[in-house]
């Protein structure tokens, strides 16, 4: 089973995996080996597998919702709830997840880290954000920046060092080490970067300490990047006809990284070249 082929950061690496599969699948004797590949429907991957008929799974599909329900019910059994509350909690959580397993996974992971005892109240489920992953990510950012007014979120995010770090993470073509990220955002030191990113621990993989300078800083899932930079019409805020409050301009993100590399990173190396 090759899961989430589309999430391979290195597209050349993904292409190599696809090419090996395509080249060798038909040479394997029938019945000896079965290979399943999961991916979102990205053009390059669909093109590579155009000789095969994919099984398409939609979030709102009945079978997907049934599987998600089984996953949620199995996880809820670990908590001290009577059967009636457990069934209601499963129904509400499934509705809020909007067919997305990752939403439920995030919830249970967060619960596992903060719960001292195996207790869960129905109110904990009812208080979760609606709207699947988009709602989860927006609620995460709103908790960090506080306040209720839309203008408040935008103004705080605009001048916050977290925005610059996220711009770099969505623009780069490979994962960065903590040291590399600290240099590109021109942070005071690596401890400063760790403290800046710590509130986003739910959607970021990052070193727990500043002395782990060679460990990678990564977005937890490709959907985080998609939410931050997506420019499709359906992602607009339906009330204001604008992007959500934490939207990143991908062109601006690429410009910020390129400007740093051109003005700060390259000159020392250029000066070392013989005239």
Image (cartoon, rainbow, N blue to C red):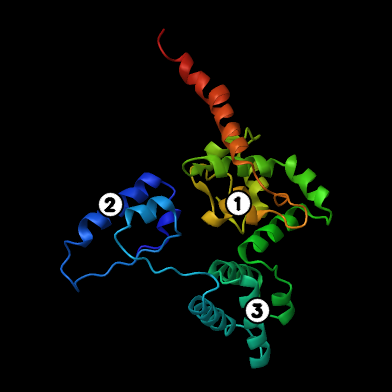
First along the sequence among labels 2 and 1: 2
Q: Nearer the viewer, mark 3 or mark 2?
A: 2
Q: Residues within 10 Å of mark 2 (few under 14, many from 20)?
A: some
Across and down, in percent, residue 12 comes to 36, 44
* Image quarter of residue 90: bottom right
Q: Residue at x 30, y 49 (%)?
A: 16
Say whether residue 220 is visible.
no
Across and down, in percent, residue 258 comes to 55, 30
Helix, strand or loop at mark 1: loop
Q: Residue at x 73, y 49 (%)?
A: 242
Report the residue that reaches farthest toward the top: 275
Q: Say above or below: 81 vs 141.
A: below
- Left or right, 226 with respect to 33, comes to right
Say whether residue 270 is visible.
yes
Q: Say above or below: 207 vs 180.
A: below
First along the sequence among labels 3 and 2: 2
How far apart marks 3 and 1 lie (CA) works out to 42 Å
Q: Nearer the viewer, mark 2 or mark 1?
A: 1
In this figure, which residue is indicated by the disc labeled 1? 232
- Left or right, 149 with respect to 237, comes to right
Across and down, in percent, residue 134 comes to 64, 60
Across and down, in percent, residue 84 comes to 67, 92
Q: Residues within 10 Å of mark 3 (few under 14, many from 20)?
A: few
Could you say which is closer to the camera, residue 73 or residue 241? Answer: 241
First along the sequence among labels 3 and 1: 3
Q: Looking at the rendering, in which quadrant would you find the N terminus?
A: bottom left
Helix, strand or loop at mark 3: loop
In this figure, which residue is indicated by the disc labeled 2? 19
In this figure, which residue is indicated by the disc labeled 3? 117
Q: Give the tally of numbered discs.
A: 3
* Image quarter of residue 35: bottom left
């Amino acid at each position: 089973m090759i899961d989430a082929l589309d999430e391979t950061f290195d597209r050349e690496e993904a292409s190599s995996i696809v090419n090996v599969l395509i080249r060798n699948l038909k040479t394997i004797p029938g019945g000896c080996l079965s290979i399943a590949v999961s991916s979102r429907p990205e053009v390059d991957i669909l093109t590579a597998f155009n000789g095969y008929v994919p099984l398409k799974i939609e979030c709102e599909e009945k079978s997907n919702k049934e599987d998600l329900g089984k996953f949620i019910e199995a996880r809820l059994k670990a908590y001290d709830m009577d059967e009636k509350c457990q069934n209601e909690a499963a129904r509400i959580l499934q509705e809020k997840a909007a067919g997305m397993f990752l939403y439920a996974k995030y919830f249970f992971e967060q619960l596992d880290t903060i719960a001292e005892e195996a207790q869960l109240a129905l109110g904990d489920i009812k208080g979760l954000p609606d709207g699947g992953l988009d709602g989860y990510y927006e609620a995460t950012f709103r908790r960090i920046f506080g306040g209720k007014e839309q203008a408040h979120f935008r103004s705080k995010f605009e001048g916050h060092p977290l925005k610059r770090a996220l711009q770099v993470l969505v623009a780069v073509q490979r994962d960065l080490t903590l040291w590399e990220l600290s240099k590109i955002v021109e942070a005071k030191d690596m401890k400063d970067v760790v403290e800046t990113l710590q509130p986003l621990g739910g959607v970021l993989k990052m070193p727990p300490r500043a002395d782990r300078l060679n460990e990678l800083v990564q977005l937890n899932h490709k959907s985080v990047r998609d939410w931050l930079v997506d420019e499709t019409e359906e992602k607009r805020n339906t009330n204001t006809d604008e992007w959500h409050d934490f939207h990143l301009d991908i062109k601006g993100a690429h410009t910020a990284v390129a400007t740093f590399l051109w003005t700060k990173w390259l000159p020392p190396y250029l000066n070392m070249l013989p005239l």
